[in-house]
Image: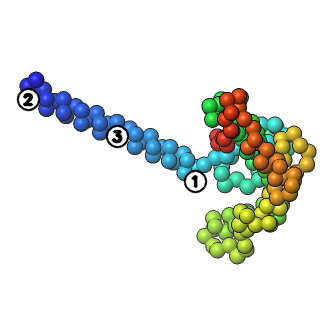
Amino acid sequence: MNEQTQSWLKITGSVLVVAVAAGVLVHQARNFNRRGEEGATVWFYDQSEHRLYAAPQSAIPPHPGIGGKNGDGVKAIVVAFRSEQADPSKRRIAYLETFTPELKSLMEEARAARASGRKFEGTIPSRDSDFLQANTLVKRPDDAEWHPSNSPEGLKIASAWRLWKSADGQAPIICVP
């Protein structure tokens, strides 16, 4: 192989490596933006429409919903087995979650303060606080009654899906839109 051909192959190889690297970086940047906190979405469930829909991660339940009765959109914890998560027909709602009016009001006040650039004067409860747990309500999609997430029934509802197994023994994972 002559010197000119070797040089041409080196340059072509280098250009190819740079092009692939640039493509990977662009792909990762797009995925980062999609997965970033600001653009993240979670599943919500419109109780009157009986339909899942994507809502911003920052949405506070109850949410307006997508039709039917206004204000009946609640957060849905949607799961599927790892090998089936891309198939919408294989996803299941593990449970639904909403907030009491007191917690919703507190969360909205804190959000409004942050959006206007002022300090929130109230106290935001920690995730493990009794207040937050007692004012976060859970239920199965077909249940009529909501239960505080820290009650015996609420704990049972929120953890039952972790015991589900696929035919090959896989545990389900939480799915996002």
Classify mark 3: residues with Cα within 10 Å, few (<14), some (14-19) or many (20+): few
Image vertical order of residue 98 relative to residue 119, above or below: above
Quarter that holds the C terminus: top right
Residue 61 shows in this picture: yes
Point 83% across, 49% down: residue = 156
Horizontal side of residue 160 vs 167, given as left or right: right
Q: Which of marks 2 and 1 is in front?
A: 2
Mark seen at residue 37: 1
Outermost residue on the top side: it is 1
User: Residue 108 falls in which quadrant of the image?
Assistant: bottom right
User: Residue 77 falls in which quadrant of the image?
Assistant: top right
Residue for badge 3: 21
Q: Which amino acid does label 1 sit on?
A: Glu
Image vertical order of residue 166 relative to residue 60, above or below: above
Q: Is mark 2 on a helix, strand or loop?
A: helix
Residue 9, image x, y percentages: 18, 29
Alpha carbons under labels 2 and 1: distance apart: 52 Å
Quarter that holds the N terminus: top left
Point 66% across, 55% down: residue = 58
Classify mark 1: residues with Cα within 10 Å, few (<14), some (14-19) or many (20+): few
Determine contact: label 2, label 1, CB under 8 Å: no
Q: Which amino acid does label 2 sit on?
A: Glu
Q: What element carries label 3?
A: helix
Q: Earlier in the sequence, mark 1 or mark 3?
A: 3
Residue for badge 2: 3
Point 73% across, 43% down: residue = 162
Q: Which of 88 and 79 is in front in this view?
A: 79
Q: What element carries label 1?
A: helix
Q: Which of marks 2 and 1 is nearer the N terminus?
A: 2
Classify mark 2: residues with Cα within 10 Å, few (<14), some (14-19) or many (20+): few
Point 84% across, 43% down: residue = 140
